[in-house]
Image (spheres, coloured by chain):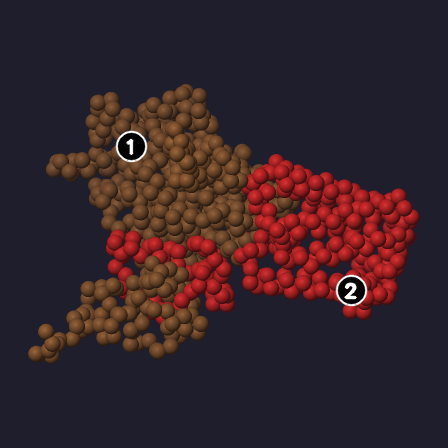
Chain colours: A red, B brown
């Protein structure tokens, strides 16, 4: 157990997890306005129509496979009658199909991101960081899948990586579990951890707002003008607010409603009053 | 019965001169920002024409609005909730920027910095998306005044549904302008399609808004709206839409588009409606009955039962009174001259239109006949099937009868008032021919032709007891040296003896900022009056400098 190993398999994951959770909370608290999927579909539709669904559906499959492999102990699957061989077949076949779909999607998306002028222009630094880490994770993960699971002697990650991850989760980290893991798996884990580290500061925040609530709410949403008032700070997009003492009753009685007063006032009122409705006039 | 109030608009198309002032002022107020270059909360279309975005009315293509299933239920044309979520990664019905237009600016630098050459320098159009040279192909009103319509108008979705001879003849026959804003529908598809639940209809006045903090940019509202009046801000990646200028409406003032309308053709007011009846009315099988069904959803604000129900819902007396005075109620329910735009989308739109009689009048006058004679006009309305069918395609799902009735009322008004203007005895039979009385016709004339500001815009203020938290928020323009300079009433407020020294509910930081900034509303000399915001009343003390003592220095 070297210092490097402790840094890589204990410190780094915990830093990343802290960043992941704290980052999301802080961003949700202070930057709801920036919390979006940052879709560029209005710029380019034809490539996205293929690339995005392929990538997303592929990664759903990949995610499900990881959840199964990492969080379900071998004893549990064996208890319901799935032996190691059957598990391996399911994992390799399911994983390969999902990975292929995802890679097809991500290739299309990368081509789109790097060649369509309109899309290139709106690509931010964080997008580049995110894409780099994501692609690295996918590349190392696929390499591990090909080298060890498909063409090599199946590596038993359920006896090493999975217990290591679970040991982190119960705050009793066991570094020794990761020492003998093949390089491709190690790199895959490290890039994935790095991705989780930057996650909340990228467009990936949209993952956490997957709108499942939509299935259970009425179609038309009504909301009162009065709801949630006062609990929020002046949102971003309003430069600053000088507070003035208001006397609404007085202002009601003094309004003449004439055309002149209306047109004189309108400029300032339209851009100024009631920003707590969170519908912004100007940024 | 669940009584709700809806702030609604009626536009009298006969008076629209297509000047685009509404569009321009709206843009200045709401959409003059990066990412919103192509966005027109208010646009004015020349009809026949493609509209904005191009051909938005073709729901076979865009799949906006609702459709009725065989079992009589309403379903979003784009699909149910599940299928919508499954297609969230790439919305198949989303218009791209090319369906609107690629926003551009000009290379103005060239005009001042170009070296001396034989030919004058040119400011080339540059795309605001790529920064490259742009060959401008389309814009918000490219086919204005039928410009280029020989090429494009055949793609007008309304004309496409009409017969072949119409397409050939339309251009000689008629043209009119259609200003459009968000319809603030009673059964909005945009709200229904929003996966995040970020879009909502305000309980108090029915204005449909996007919660910018809750929007996640899934774009389903953009494709869900059959009027394509929800736009995607491509810089913030959130949806934005016409707000019916709610900050103005809350203060009892009309929207910017209404305020600045040169033709004074817009009317604003409340409609009371039965929220429980909306879905059933929107689900009626026959599209031609949707207009009447929507009219029936509207409630009579004079009906004691309605008033009692409204009060039990907590509606304030001044709002009920405003609903009774509403010009919208008169035009929709009493005179029945206003019609909704595309009721067949089943969204129950609440911006209605009075169809234009002017194409008919023009034809009659151009043939040398008397364009104010009621018989000529009635005959022409009967005969001019083309404008009638086209208007019906816009306003009544193709049923010409309501359009005809509306136009006949306008024609009758024209003739009836002509007699009065000429000092003749008004002909009551003209009014009876359209099922009205002379008094009603005169009242309708006043509303349509010469109504004053306060008759066109009957807008009750938002209730202050609900808006108490506004105290914490002030206009950013009110800042030090800002153009608002503290607003018109602030000096009164600051001086008000009824108020405690420390404003209640004000943030400490904000109050400090207020105290620290140099206040332009305060007189520069203590004890003197600030003429900058003097309203002409009172202020006798402090208006003049204190009298010099006799024999003072000369």
Tell me: residue A223, above or below residue B290: below
Tell me: residue B537, above or below residue B123: below
Tell me: residue B506, above or below residue B47: below
- Find residue B180 and report its image quarter: top left
- Find residue A269 and report its image quarter: bottom left
Q: Residue at x 35, y 35 (%)?
A: B177
- Between tags 1 and 2, which lies in front? 2
Query: Is circle 1 on the same chain as circle 2?
Result: no
Q: Residue at x 39, y 59 (%)?
A: A272
Q: Residue A12 appears at what percent x and percent y?
A: 75, 63
Quarter the C terminus of chain B occupies: bottom left
Q: Is residue A217 left or right of residue A93?
A: left
Please rate how many residues cluster around mark 1, counting C-alpha atoms within 10 Å: few if below 14, some from 14 to 19, many from 20: some
Viewer-proximal residue, A58 or B507?
B507
Viewer-proximal residue, A234 or A69?
A234
- Find residue B340 and report its image quarter: top left
The secondary structure type at the circle numbered 1 is: helix
Which residue in the structure is indicated by mark 1? B358
Q: CA distance from mark 1 to mark 2?
A: 80 Å
Q: Is residue A19 left or right of residue B100?
A: right
Which residue in the structure is indicated by mark 2? A7
The secondary structure type at the circle numbered 2 is: helix
Q: Residue B496 appears at what percent x and percent y?
A: 29, 74
Tag shown at residue B393? none
Tell me: residue B358, above or below residue B467: above
Say if residue B429 shows up in the picture.
no
Q: What chain does badge 1 belong to?
A: B
Q: What chain does badge 2 belong to?
A: A
Q: Residue at x 84, y 44 (%)?
A: A146
Q: Residue at x 53, y 40 (%)?
A: B130
Quarter the N terminus of chain B occupies: bottom left
Q: Is residue B80 left or right of residue A146?
A: left
């Amino acid at each position: 157990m070297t210092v490097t190993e402790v840094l890589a398999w204990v410190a780094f994951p915990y830093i990343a997890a802290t960043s992941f959770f704290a980052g999301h909370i802080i961003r949700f608290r202070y930057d709801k306005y920036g919390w979006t999927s940052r879709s560029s579909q209005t710029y380019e539709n034809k490539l996205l129509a293929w690339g995005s669904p392929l990538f997303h559906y592929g990664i759903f499959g990949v995610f499900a496979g990881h959840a199964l492999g990492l969080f379900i102990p071998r004893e549990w699957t064996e208890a319901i009658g799935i032996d190691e061989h059957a598990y391996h077949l399911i994992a390799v076949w399911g994983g390969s199909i999902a990975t292929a779909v995802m890679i097809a999607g991500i290739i299309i998306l990368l081509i789109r991101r790097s060649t369509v002028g309109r899309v290139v222009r709106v690509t931010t630094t964080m997008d580049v960081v995110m894409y780099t880490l994501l692609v690295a994770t996918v590349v190392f993960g696929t390499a591990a899948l090909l080298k060890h699971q498909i063409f090599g002697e199946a590596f038993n990650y359920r006896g090493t990586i999975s217990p290591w991850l679970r040991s982190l989760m119960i705050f009793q980290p066991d570094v020794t579990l990761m020492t003998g893991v093949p390089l491709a798996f190690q790199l895959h884990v490290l890039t994935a951890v790095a991705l989780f580290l930057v996650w909340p500061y990228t467009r990936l925040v949209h993952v956490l707002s997957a709108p499942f609530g939509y299935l259970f709410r009425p179609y038309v949403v009504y909301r009162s003008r009065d709801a949630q008032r006062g609990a929020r700070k002046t949102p971003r997009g309003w430069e600053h607010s000088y507070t003035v003492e208001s006397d609404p009753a007085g202002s009601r009685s003094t309004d003449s409603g004439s055309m002149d007063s209306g047109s004189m006032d309108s400029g300032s009122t339209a851009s100024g009053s009631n920003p707590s409705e969170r519908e912004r006039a100007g940024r | 019965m669940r009584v709700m109030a809806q702030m609604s608009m009626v536009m009298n198309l006969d008076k629209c001169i297509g000047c685009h002032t509404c569009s321009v002022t709206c843009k200045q107020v709401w959409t003059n920002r990066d990412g919103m270059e192509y966005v027109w909360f208010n646009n004015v279309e020349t009809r026949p024409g493609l509209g904005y975005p191009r051909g938005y009315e073709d729901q076979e293509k865009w799949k906006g609005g609702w459709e009725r299933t065989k079992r009589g239920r309403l379903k979003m044309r784009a699909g149910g909730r599940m299928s919508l979520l499954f297609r969230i990664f790439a919305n198949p019905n989303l218009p791209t920027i090319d369906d609107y237009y690629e926003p551009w600016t000009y290379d103005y630098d060239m005009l001042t910095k170009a070296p001396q050459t034989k030919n004058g320098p040119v400011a080339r159009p540059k795309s605001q998306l790529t920064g490259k040279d742009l060959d401008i192909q389309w814009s918000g009103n490219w086919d204005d005044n039928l410009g280029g319509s020989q090429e494009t108008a055949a793609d007008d979705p309304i004309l496409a549904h009409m017969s072949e001879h119409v397409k050939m003849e339309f251009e000689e026959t008629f043209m009119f302008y259609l200003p459009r804003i968000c319809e603030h529908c009673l059964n909005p598809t945009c709200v229904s399609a929003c996966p995040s639940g970020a879009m909502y209809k305000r309980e108090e006045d029915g204005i449909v808004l996007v919660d910018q903090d809750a929007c996640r940019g899934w774009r389903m509202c953009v494709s869900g709206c059959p009027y394509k009046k929800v736009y995607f801000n491509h810089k913030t990646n959130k949806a934005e839409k016409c707000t019916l200028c709610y900050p103005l409406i809350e203060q009892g003032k009309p929207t910017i588009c209404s305020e600045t309308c040169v033709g004074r053709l817009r009317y604003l007011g409340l409609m009371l409606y039965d929220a429980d009846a909306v879905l059933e009315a929107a689900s009626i099988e026959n599209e031609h009955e949707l207009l009447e069904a929507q009219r029936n959803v509207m409630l009579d604000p004079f009906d004691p039962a309605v008033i009692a129900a409204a009060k039990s819902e907590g509606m304030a007396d001044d709002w009920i009174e405003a609903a009774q005075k509403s010009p919208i109620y008169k035009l929709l329910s009493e005179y029945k001259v206003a019609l909704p735009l595309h009721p067949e989308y089943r969204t129950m739109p609440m911006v209605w239109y009075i169809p234009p009689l002017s194409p008919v009048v023009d034809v009659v006058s151009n043939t040398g006949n008397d364009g104010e004679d009621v018989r000529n006009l009635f005959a022409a309305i009967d005969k001019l099937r083309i404008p009638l069918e086209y208007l019906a395609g816009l306003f009544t799902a193709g049923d010409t009868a309501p359009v005809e009735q509306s136009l006949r009322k306008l024609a009758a008004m024209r003739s009836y008032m002509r007699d009065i203007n000429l000092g003749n005895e008004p002909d009551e039979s003209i009014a009876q021919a359209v099922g009205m009385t002379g008094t009603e016709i005169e009242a309708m004339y006043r509303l349509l032709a010469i109504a004053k500001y306060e008759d066109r815009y009957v807008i009750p203020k938002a209730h202050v007891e609900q808006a108490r938290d506004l105290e914490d928020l002030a206009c950013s323009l009110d800042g030090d040296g800002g153009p608002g300079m503290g607003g018109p009433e602030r000096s009164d407020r600051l001086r008000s003896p009824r108020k405690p020294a420390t404003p209640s509910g004000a943030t400490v930081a904000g109050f400090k900022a207020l105290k620290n900034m140099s206040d332009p509303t305060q007189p520069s000399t203590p004890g003197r009056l600030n003429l900058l915001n003097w309203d002409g009343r009172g202020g006798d003390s402090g208006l003049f400098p204190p009298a010099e003592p006799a024999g003072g220095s000369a």
